[in-house]
Image (tube, helix red, strand yellow):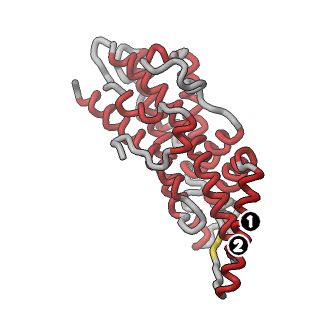
């Protein structure tokens, strides 16, 4: 085992743990704790980018008998463009004809884990995160503070996430019966606040003021419903990247000079079904 082998092992852990950190932060994010949204964006953009670049490099090395031939300059051409990177990894997956049986994973447990998911919600997740990774919205707050015109012409990334990702998730998964129940509870909270003379002032993800018990309670309920589903959609992308890297790692280990460790040990946490993605709030490749 040489320095390259160990470098790939370390990089794989960085990528996988960042994706896990991002999924965990999404579980905690809400209008009152908006910093978790940014924590999720930073972690997910880093994890998706580094996992994608790692896949591109390993695939190239496999095609060249274990020699990494892509130059640093060539790798930089991808920049932080998550759309371009993820499309490239999907091209690799298509060319490799990934088979779950070949990488020792249950063939019938999870469907469609071997290709990049491309629903409208997945596309919106990638779009918001790609803008963040490319610094178009990463420093939005500082740009607004100093009067930078470019920032003011764009949405806050948290607002973009709510409009482009969360609202479609709610439209698809927030049951009418659950919403009616949440509205009744919000009414009750509003009456209790009025009787106790309690006033609240929060700011929603999209910037509007939540100045009543009803508004704050209903937004909290919406966020709780959305969190488990947005986490699922994000982890489906992580699952694709993990599945691809596990397969590439398997191929790399059979070269005359092994260039990668057993990546199933690093990315195996993401090979779970959608129900598990929705139920588990805390993620780490190092255990709970």
Please tell me whether residue 34 is drawn above or below residue 101 in the rendered image. Answer: below
Residue 19's spot in the image, x, y percent? Answer: 46, 43
Indicate left or right for 2 with 214 as reference.
left
Please tell me whether residue 209 is drawn above or below residue 258 in the rendered image. Answer: below
Residue 9 occupies quadrant: top left
Residue at which label 1 appears: 184
Q: Quadrant of the N terminus?
A: top left
Please tell me whether residue 156 is drawn above or below residue 269 in the rendered image. Answer: below
**Residue at the spot x=45%, y=21% of the render?**
105
**Residue at the spot x=44%, y=44% of the render?**
20
Indicate left or right for 207 with 60 as reference.
right
**Residue at the spot x=55%, y=64% of the render?**
34
| 58 and 281: which is toward the camera | 281
| 284 and 41: which is toward the camera | 284
Is mark 2 in CB contact (under 8 Å) with mark 1?
yes
Indicate left or right for 121 with 279 as reference.
right
Q: Residue furthest bottom?
A: 197
């Amino acid at each position: 085992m040489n320095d390259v082998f160990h470098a790939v092992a370390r990089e794989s852990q960085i990528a996988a743990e960042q994706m896990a950190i991002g999924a965990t932060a999404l579980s905690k994010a809400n209008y009152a704790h908006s910093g978790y949204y940014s924590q999720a964006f930073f972690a997910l953009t880093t994890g998706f980018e580094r996992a994608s670049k790692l896949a591109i490099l390993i695939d190239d090395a496999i095609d060249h008998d274990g020699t990494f031939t892509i130059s640093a300059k060539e790798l930089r051409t991808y920049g932080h463009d998550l759309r371009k990177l993820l499309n490239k990894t999907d091209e690799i997956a298509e060319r490799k004809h990934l088979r779950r049986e070949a990488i020792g994973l249950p063939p019938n447990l999870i469907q469609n884990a071997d290709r990049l998911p491309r629903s409208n919600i997945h596309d919106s997740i990638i779009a918001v995160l790609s803008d963040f990774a490319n610094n178009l919205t990463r420093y939005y707050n500082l740009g607004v503070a100093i009067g930078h015109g470019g920032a003011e012409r764009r949405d806050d990334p948290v607002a973009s996430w709510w409009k482009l990702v969360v609202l479609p998730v709610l439209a698809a998964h927030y049951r009418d019966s659950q919403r009616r129940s949440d509205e009744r509870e919000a009414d009750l909270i509003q009456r209790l606040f009025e009787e106790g003379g309690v006033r609240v002032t929060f700011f929603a993800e999209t910037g509007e003021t939540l100045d009543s018990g009803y508004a704050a309670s209903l937004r909290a309920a919406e966020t709780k419903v959305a969190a488990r589903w947005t986490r699922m959609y994000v982890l489906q992308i992580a699952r694709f990247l993990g599945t691809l890297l596990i397969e590439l790692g398997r191929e790399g280990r059979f070269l005359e000079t092994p260039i990668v460790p057993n990546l199933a040990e690093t990315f195996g946490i993401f090979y779970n079904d959608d129900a598990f993605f929705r139920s588990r709030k805390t993620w780490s490749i190092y255990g709970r």
